[in-house]
């Protein structure tokens, strides 16, 4: 929800909040931005990325649909892998960058910053057995970063986080 951030509390602590695509973003938390940077580089930082636009692409041609407009190679991705790259229009003009998450041969998530590109996906899917569902409002996204992030999260997760490699995720839910 756009009002999920307690802007008053954040602003009372000195945060600068801006609105982008209908969502509040704290540009800093009211402290020296370099101190915030150092805290994340030496500890654990948590970033609410709720407003990242999330699309679920399903169907036997899901990978083909994504590949039509994604500059990184989809072929060769295994279940649980993530690829970063640029998304382009039919003429090759970049519209955004983002990540593609592969759950299975017929199920992917696309996460980008551009809102309201449903028509872009619809045009891209023409002639393919692929469906695109806008899932931004359905899916939370919390980014936990920094050198101590694994140790911070491990007590909260039933699986060993050491199993995950770089740009990997578990395609089946876990607690």
Image (tube, helix red, strand yellow):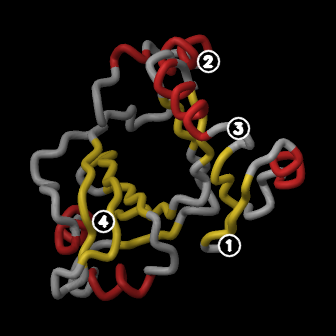
CA distance for labels 2 and 3: 28 Å
Q: Quadrant of residue 86?
A: bottom left
Of callouts 4 and 1, which one flags the residue occurring earlier in the amino acid sequence? 1
Q: Earlier in the sequence, mark 2 or mark 3?
A: 3
How many numbered circles are shown? 4
Q: Which residue is mark 4?
A: 59
Q: Nearer the viewer, mark 2 or mark 4?
A: 2
Residue 49: percent from left, percent from top = 57, 50
For marks 4 and 3, give the CA distance. 47 Å
The correct choice, above or below, for 135 with respect to 35 in the image is below
Residue 173 in percent (x, y) is at: 49, 34
Query: Considering only order in the chain, which callout, 3 or 1, is on the residue closer to the N terminus?
Result: 1
Of residues 151 and 19, the one drawn nearer to the viewer in this rendering: 19
Residue drawn at point x = 21 percent, y = 62 percent: 63
Quadrant where the image shows the C terminus: top right
Q: At 78% across and 54% down in the image, what residue appears? A: 4
Residue at numbered disc 1: 22
Instruction: Please name which of the two marks, 1 or 3, marks the residue nearer to the observer.
Output: 3
Q: Is the residue marked by circle 3 packed among few (<14), some (14-19), or many (20+) residues within 10 Å? A: few
Q: Is residue 134 left or right of residue 56?
A: right
Mark 2, secondary structure of its residue: helix
Location of residue 27 with respect to 172 vertically, above or below: below
Question: How packed is label 1: few (under 14 Cα within 10 Å), some, or many (20 or more)?
Answer: few
Q: Nearer the viewer, residue 15 or 78?
A: 15
Question: What residue is shown with label 3?
Answer: 31
SS at circle 4: loop
- Which of pointers 4 and 1 indicates the residue nearer the eye? 1
Q: Quadrant of residue 132?
A: bottom left
- Residue under pointer 2: 156
Disc 2 or 4, which lies upstream in sequence? 4
Return the disc, 2 or 1, that comes first in the chain's sequence.
1
């Amino acid at each position: 929800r756009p009002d999920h951030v307690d802007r008053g509390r954040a602003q009372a602590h000195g945060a600068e909040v801006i609105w982008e695509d209908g969502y509040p973003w704290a540009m800093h938390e009211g402290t020296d931005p370099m101190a915030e940077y150092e805290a994340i580089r030496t500890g654990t930082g948590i970033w609410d990325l709720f407003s990242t636009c999330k699309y679920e692409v399903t169907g036997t041609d899901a990978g083909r649909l994504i590949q039509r407009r994604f500059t990184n190679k989809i072929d060769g991705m295994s279940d649980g892998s993530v690829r970063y790259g640029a998304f382009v229009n039919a003429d090759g003009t970049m519209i955004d960058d983002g990540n593609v998450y592969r759950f299975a041969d017929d199920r992917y998530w696309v996460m980008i910053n551009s809102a309201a590109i449903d028509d872009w996906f619809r045009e891209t899917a023409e002639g393919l057995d692929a469906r695109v569902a806008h899932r931004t409002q359905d899916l939370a996204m919390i980014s936990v970063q920094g050198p101590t992030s694994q140790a911070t999260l491990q007590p909260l997760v039933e699986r060993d986080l050491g199993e995950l490699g770089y740009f990997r995720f578990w395609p089946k839910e876990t607690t």
